[in-house]
Image (spheres, rainbow, N blue to C red):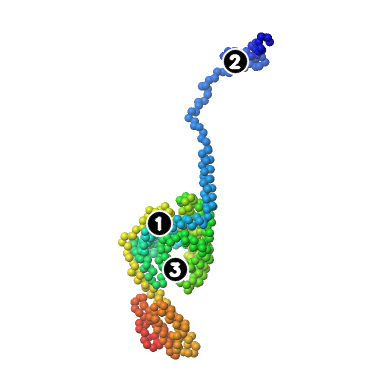
Amino acid sequence: MDSNNQYPTAPAQGSQFVDYSKSPTESVPAVPGTPTTPPPPPFDSSSLPPLHTDLKPRRSHKWLWITLVVIVLVLLAGAAYAFMISPDKVVASTLAEIDRATKLHSGFKLQLISENALLKDAYLEIVSETDITSEIKSQVNMDVSAQAMQASGEVRLIGTTLYGQLKSYPQQFMTPDMQGAIGKWYSVNIETLTQLQGSYLSPNIASTTLGMKPASLAKAYETLRAEGVISEPKFAGVGSGSSGLVRKYSFEVDKAALAKFITKTYRTEVGEDQYAAEIEQGVAMGLSNLDISSIVASVAMFSGSLREITGTVKVPQALESTTMGVKGLIGTLSYDNTKTDFQVTVPVGAIAVDTLLLSSLQQSKMKAQTVGIKARTMQIRPLAELFYDKGLGYKGACKDPEIVSIITDLNMEGVIPICRDSAAAYLFAVQFIDVATTSKKYMCIDSKGGVKELAKLAAGYVCK
């Protein structure tokens, strides 16, 4: 090392070093001990395959995963929403929404389950539109269809006037009178239907039959719950309907409570208490033979608006012979709160049938009254004979408590019977109106076994 140079001197360039400063084309001496290889050929870009310049960058799948996550979250939120809110409150609020509506569009379809050739694929479909903006207006279209027949008609209620039209009728049951009535509108006032004494058709029942909205659906629901007719609703899952996703709630029906409720309603509407126990027993017996499924109510997933209510009633196989082969019924009540643009108008050229119908109802009343008078009159004979067997003859029979009870019943119907008795004979007669001739006659029985209808009643104890 040079003392004047503080850094070591680089060794002289020898054959063991490669000078990379030279051009690649210049020869470079080989390193001793290494094999010699020829230099690579010059790079020729023309030998490469053509580049695809139209390729686009690969799209990420991140958006797909985000969409799936959002869908799952929405479904979970809907399920949580349905579970967190009380089903009872959901149903009550849904019905309250309908109560607040002034225009309602609803439908009802009753489908028969039957293999009977006449009733196969039979159904009754009713579409109802009710407007209560000012006065009550309702129009109902009814269609009855089966493989063997079809019929349709329309009913409108405006105020207290009922309008009806028969649109079609099965040809196999067509009569000349029926043919002439098709396509014509007829009208009658509901009050006319209630003028018949003893008629079971009250204005309230008539309105309900026409599909009109009751005073409060929410109140009716509370009543059914309070009476134990339907159970507390339970969440029954999420499904899809014609208008999107729906939440479903199910109710169980108590048949014994339903029988009591029907009887109670009958007593309220008709005012009949005498046969209430027998009616309840009969209804309960009839319901016990039916398999009533759970009632399922479907409401819109997020808005909570009612969409439909469905229920099924099945008839036991042992009773199919008495129901013309009907195995069951499927009932579906639908509601659409979006159809509010309809109008209920008075039909043009409707034929009023109030007088004709009232006359027919009056005749029905007179017939029923006549049947009742004759039946009560015939009850007198065995009572008079029992009185005679007491050893007193017939004298005083007209004052027998059981005969007096029949006389009182007839008086309640505006009829004054004629009762005559003596030691050896009796006569009992009641005046009635002959429906066929509208003339007054007497239904008469006597102790000699006579039973006659007389225009005039002779004196004495013999019907003649």
Q: Please give the residue where the numbered disc 1 appears in the rendered image.
A: 102
Q: Residues within 10 Å of mark 2 (few under 14, many from 20)?
A: few
Q: Please give the residue where the numbered disc 3 appears in the rendered image.
A: 269
Which numbered disc flags the more N-terminal residue, 2 or 1?
2
Secondary structure beneath dot 2 equals loop
Q: Please give the residue where the numbered disc 2 appears in the rendered image.
A: 20
Figure check: 244 above or below 120: above
Is 124 on the left-hand or right-hand side of 252? Answer: left
Question: Residue sitting at 41 percent across and 58 percent down?
Answer: 128
The C terminus lies in quadrant: bottom left
Figure check: 410 above or below 71: below
Question: Residue sitting at 49 percent across and 28 percent down?
Answer: 52
Spatial separation of the CA atoms under disc 3 and disc 2: 117 Å
Which numbered disc flags the more N-terminal residue, 3 or 2?
2
Q: Amino acid at mark 3?
A: Glu
**Residue 214 in the image, given as x and y percentages of width and height:** 43, 61
Secondary structure beneath dot 1 equals loop
Question: Residue sitting at 35 percent across and 79 percent down?
Answer: 440
Q: Amino acid at mark 1?
A: Thr
